[in-house]
Image (cartoon, helix red, strand yellow):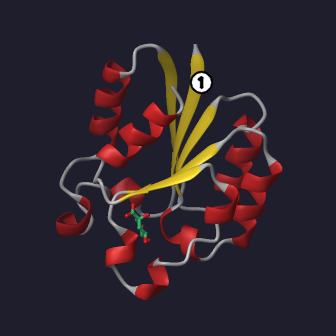
Amino acid sequence: MKKILVINGPNLNLLGKREPTVYGNHSFESYFNELKEKFTTVTLSYYQSNIEGEIIDKLHEVGFTYDGIVLNAAAYTHTSVAIADAIKAIETPVVEVHISNVYARETFRHKSFLAPNVKGIITGFGLQSYELAIQSFL
Ligand code: DQA
């Protein structure tokens, strides 16, 4: 079975409560259960952290053995050279996802430090962005 890890970055633990007009009113935990029911032929796991270094540690931990990583680095997307370098350092392909369409928002969200090092980017499909990213690994 393919092993795929979903990583959510800062503030995404508040999904469902945080700015529902932008990010919806569904908690990630309940959506993740739906994902597991949908993708029964893969081993799906989930990790969330608000801390940049913990996201980097997780990328190092799984990045030589897993088949795919779905990463929503949230605001770190637009700031983190360190996460960009970690993605480059590992072997597992990473797909960058965003719930909102970052290109329809403030210009500071148009820059992704991660973009050059990821396999591809899915942005703007709501929580479905994660499902599309998982599908890309199958
Ligand atoms: C986000 C977009 C980012 O710009 C923002 O900082 C987030 C969430 C998204 O999923 O739409 O926290 O990554």
Q: Quadrant of residue 107?
A: bottom left
Q: Is residue 6 left or right of residue 12?
A: right
Q: Against 106, is 75 above or below?
A: above
Q: Quadrant of residue 37?
A: top left
Res. 4 visible in picture: yes
Q: Residue at x 37, y 38 (%)?
A: 131
Q: Is residue 78 left or right of residue 63?
A: left
Q: Residue at x 61, y 35 (%)?
A: 68
Q: Residue 99: where, in percent of width, then height? A: 34, 57
Ligand 1 lies in which image quarter? Answer: bottom left
Placement of the N terminus among the 4 image quadrants: top right
Residue to which mark 1 is pinned: 3
Res. 97 visible in picture: no
Q: Quadrant of residue 56?
A: bottom right
Q: Against 135, is 124 above or below?
A: below
Question: 61 and 1: which one is in front?
Answer: 1
Q: Residue 57: where, in percent of width, then height? A: 73, 49
